[in-house]
Image: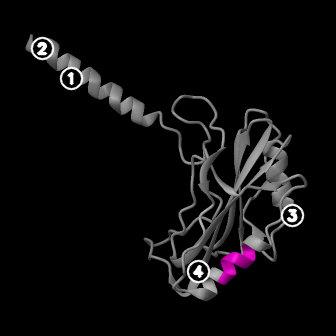
């Protein structure tokens, strides 16, 4: 009886650990069910920024958001869209952050990502090294923009398949004048925003 109980406990632990490994990586766009996640509107409105402790950083983030250029047919959503399975971790701070959402009917992930890549927002430079393949299996993509090489601020657009088109989320971060990056071990560096 004790051997059978030990085998059952071991089997449960193995199953639990395999389930944890099956969870998609951030940005994968596929939940544990295996079905593509589909961004959808939720009832809460897009959060309004709370009063900032750094007006200049918040003004910069707002200026980048105001200058956001999206493909023709994009409709700004007044509601927060759910279903995005990744987020941008801004490693250096303090910073001010804003978020915005759009839907684009009859668009594809690859066409939207490539359009965003080719049409920079404001004076920002892209961190996306190459175009997104026109493969129908691709159900999400990320396009990043930064103000200068090696910057850890800017805009990261996440594009996800949604209904007959796509949904787009913009994560915008602007650092304060006192922002610092945590030190990394010798030879290590931060990846550019939008590159995972």
Q: Nearer the viewer, mark 1 or mark 4?
A: 4
Residue found at x 80% / y 73%: 67
Farthest-out residue, right: 72
Mark 1 vs mark 3, CA separation in Å: 55 Å
Q: Secondary structure at mark 3?
A: loop
Give the image quarter of residue 100: bottom right
Mark 1 vs mark 2, CA separation in Å: 10 Å
Q: Nearer the viewer, mark 1 or mark 2?
A: 1
Q: Position of residue 66 (x, y in %)?
A: 77, 73
Which badge, 1 or 4, comes first in the chain's sequence?
A: 1
Task: Give neighbour class at mark 1: few <14, some 14-19, many 20+ (Cα, 10 Å).
Answer: few
Q: Is residue 28 above or below residue 137?
A: below
Which badge, 1 or 3, comes first in the chain's sequence?
A: 1
Report whether residue 148 is seen: no
Task: Give neighbour class at mark 3: few <14, some 14-19, many 20+ (Cα, 10 Å).
Answer: some
Farthest-out residue, left: 2
Which badge, 1 or 2, comes first in the chain's sequence?
A: 2
Give the image quarter of residue 134: top right
Q: Determine whether label 1 and label 2 are within 8 Å by CB.
A: no
Q: Which mark is residue 119?
A: 3
Residue found at x 81% / y 54%: 75
Mark 4, residue position: 175
Mark 1, residue position: 9
Residue found at x 27% / y 21%: 11
Q: Secondary structure at mark 4?
A: strand
The stretch of residues the image draws in magenta is: 59-64
Q: Quadrant of the N terminus?
A: top left
Closer to us: 127 or 170: 170
Q: Which mark is residue 3?
A: 2
């Amino acid at each position: 009886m004790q051997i059978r109980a030990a085998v059952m406990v071991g089997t449960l632990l193995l199953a639990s650990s395999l389930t944890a490994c099956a969870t998609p990586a951030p940005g994968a766009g596929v939940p544990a069910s295996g079905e593509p996640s589909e961004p959808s509107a939720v009832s809460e409105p897009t959060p309004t920024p709370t009063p900032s402790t750094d007006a200049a950083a918040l003004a910069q983030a707002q200026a980048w958001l105001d200058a956001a250029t999206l493909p023709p047919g994009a409709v700004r959503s007044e509601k927060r869209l759910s279903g995005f399975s990744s987020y941008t971790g801004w490693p250096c701070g303090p910073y001010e952050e804003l978020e915005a959402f759009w839907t684009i009917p009859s668009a594809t992930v690859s066409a939207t990502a490539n359009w965003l890549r080719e049409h920079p927002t404001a004076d920002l430079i892209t961190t996306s090294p190459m175009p997104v393949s026109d493969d129908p299996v691709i159900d999400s993509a990320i396009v990043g923009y930064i103000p200068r090489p090696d910057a850890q601020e800017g805009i990261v657009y996440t594009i996800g398949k949604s209904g007959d088109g796509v949904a787009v989320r913009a994560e915008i971060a602007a650092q304060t004048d006192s922002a610092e990056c945590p030190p990394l071990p010798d030879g290590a560096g931060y990846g550019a925003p939008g590159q995972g």
